[in-house]
Amino acid sequence: MKIKLMALIFCSLLLFLPHDIAFSASVNYARVLSSGAYIYSDQALSNKIFEVPYSYYVKIEQNYSQTVKVSYNSPSGNAPVIYGYMSASDLTVTEGVPSSPFAVIKVSSGVSDVLFVDHALKSPLFNVPENEIMYFYGKVTSGDKTLCYVYYGNKLGYIDEKSLNPYVIPTNPDPLPSVDEPPETDKPTTVTPTRLGETLQIVIIVGISVISISIVYFLFRPQKNETHEETGFITDDET
C-alpha cells in the first residue's frame, strides 16, 4: 500500500515538469528585421524554401524551442499559404495583427524561361512564356544564380530572377524600430524557447527530489518503541 501511494504521488509531481508549449494567443506574428532569414521545409533547417523579405512578417503556428513553425501568406490570397520552419533567432515577436504582413507581390516574366520544382534546378515543371504574371514569395541563392520562388500555373517553383522584369519589394508599411537604441525594458522581444528556463527546470527537479525523499522517509522511517527509560516515568513493576 505504501509503495502504491508513493508511486501515485511521484507520478502526480511529474505533471509539474516543464513541457513544450505554444505561443500565447496574444502573440501570433513575428517580424523579420535582419537579412538571411529563410523559411525551411524541414525542422532541421537544412532545405531552404525562400528568404523572407526584410521588414515583413510570418505567422506563428508552433514553437519548437530553437525553431518555429510558421505560415506565410493569407489563406484568402491568390497564392497558396506556405508552411515551413524558421530559426527563432531570426524573428522578433510582435503583438496584434499587422496590416500587411506578407510580401507576396505580382511579378512578370521578361523573357521565356523554365520553372523548376527545386532550387537545384534538376526537376523542371514547364516553360513560362514572356509577359506572364506570377506571384512572388521570396528569393534564394543557388550557386551563382538568384532564384525567385513564385506561384504560376497552379504550381509553386523557382525561376531565374534575370528572366523577370524589374520589380520592387516595398518596405512593410508598419513602423520600423527606432535607429536609436531603446531602453533595455523597451527592446523588442526575440522569439525564444517557450520551455521554462533551464534554471527553473533545475529548481523544479531538485524540489521534486526533496519531496520524494521526504515521502520515502516518512513512509518507511523506523517506529520507536517508547520505554520507561525514554518517558522518565516509573512503572508499577519497578516500585
Image (tube, helix red, strand yellow):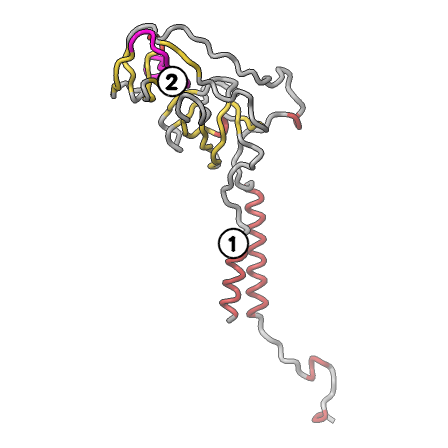
Q: Which residue is mark 1?
A: 14
Secondary structure of residue under mark 2? strand
Q: Which residue is mark 2?
A: 140
Secondary structure of residue under mark 1? helix
Q: Could you tell me which residue is drawn at 40 percent across and 16 percent down?
A: 136
> Disc number at residue 163?
none
Name the amino acid type tagged 2.
Val
Residue 124 occupies which quadrant of the picture?
A: top left
Instruction: Give the percent coordinates (x, y) of residue 43.
Output: 40, 33
Q: Is residue 130 magenta?
A: yes
Question: Majority secondary structure of the magenta segment?
Answer: strand
Range of magenta residues? 129-148
Choose between 219 and 44: the one closer to the eye.
44
Instruction: Give the percent coordinates (x, y) of residue 37.
Output: 46, 22
Q: Could you tell me which residue is drawn at 33 percent across and 12 percent down?
A: 160
> In the image, is residue 14 above or below residue 119?
below
Instruction: Give the percent coordinates (x, y) of residue 224.
Output: 62, 77
- Which is nearer the N-term, disc 2 or disc 1? 1
Choose between 106 and 30: the one closer to the eye.
106
Choose between 148 and 194: the one closer to the eye.
148
Choose between 56 and 146: the one closer to the eye.
56
Instruction: Give the percent coordinates (x, y) of residue 210.
Output: 58, 57
Q: How many residues crowd around disc 2 within 10 Å: few (fewer than 14), some, or many (20 or more)?
A: many
Q: Could you tell me which residue is drawn at 58 percent across and 34 percent down?
A: 26
Q: Quadrant of the C terminus?
A: bottom right
